[in-house]
Image (cartoon, rainbow, N blue to C red):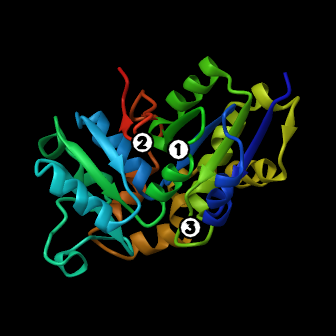
Amino acid sequence: MNTSIEVLFTPAEFAALAQRDLSETACIVFDVLRATSSMVTALAHGAQAVVPVATIPDALAWRGRDPDVLLAGERNGLRIRAVLTGGVEFDLGNSPREFGPERVRGRTIVMTTTNGTRALEACRPAAHVWVGAFLNLTAVVEALRRVQPRHLLVVCSGTIEQAAFEDALAAGALCEAVWELYREGEVADSVQLALEAWRRHANDLAAGLGSGRNGRRLLARPELRDDVSFCAMRDRYAFAPTLDANAIVRWLK
């Protein structure tokens, strides 16, 4: 069986997935700082589901249909405020430290972020879509080993319209962990780039995450700087959330 593995670094690349046949492809979506880290944390703390949506109006429409959902998300890294929505304050931002069990247990969370939720939407036609972070990296690897998809796309959400260094590090860590499954197939040059970045920073992940633009921005804000060390924790959670047919992220226990 011919196999392939590829890393997509930028939003322009994942936007182009609409032109590709993903019927035999698995996608792993990383938005390490911070959307996918927050989704994994929310589900680990008992959230019923996370609904990723692309825009603020999409999130408000969900609230209109179901007043009990929690609204979460950010624009420019900060929680969405009433001034952007016409009067509705979002319940949560995009810091994984906000998604504690006392806030999220038993709740459905509708989330919109600058890039991560867009990346998940772009991957929706794929045969399998998993939500990845350093927080659950081994669980994602184990899921891939069980399914062994023919084609693997590692999708880095990026930031605005550019690549994000922390996502490239996660992509490299994943590619290294599943290398034996794909090394005999078609390996894109983007995989080698991700591997090289990861191997330079594997021994000090927090420093690596803090060296990119998003990491530096978070470290410069006292209320957000602890997000970097939180998102750098390896394997805090032992499950791999999936995007189901209704584009809802769930932990299938």
Q: Measured from the top left, where is residue 5 in percent x and y? A: 76, 39
Front in this rendered view, residue 220 or 141: 141
Instruction: Give the residue displayed 84% in from the left and 52% down from the top.
Output: 189
- The kind of secondary structure element at disc 3 is helix
Res 247 label? 2
Q: Does 55 appear above or below 105?
A: below
Front in this rendered view, residue 124 or 204: 124
Q: Measured from the top left, where is residue 137 in percent x and y? A: 52, 36
Q: Marks 3 and 2, Cα distance to the nearest angstrom?
A: 33 Å
Instruction: Give the residue displayed 22% in from the left and 33% down from the top.
Output: 46
Q: Which residue is mark 3?
A: 211
Q: Measured from the top left, where is residue 38 in percent x and y? A: 35, 49
- The kind of secondary structure element at disc 1 is loop
Bin the neighbour count of mark 3 within 10 Å (Cα to Cα): few under 14, some 14-19, many 20 and up: some
Q: Which residue is mark 1?
A: 124
Q: Are marks 3 and 2 in contact (CB under 8 Å)?
A: no
Q: What amino acid type is highlighted by mark number 2?
A: Ala
Q: Does 1 appear above or below 110?
A: above
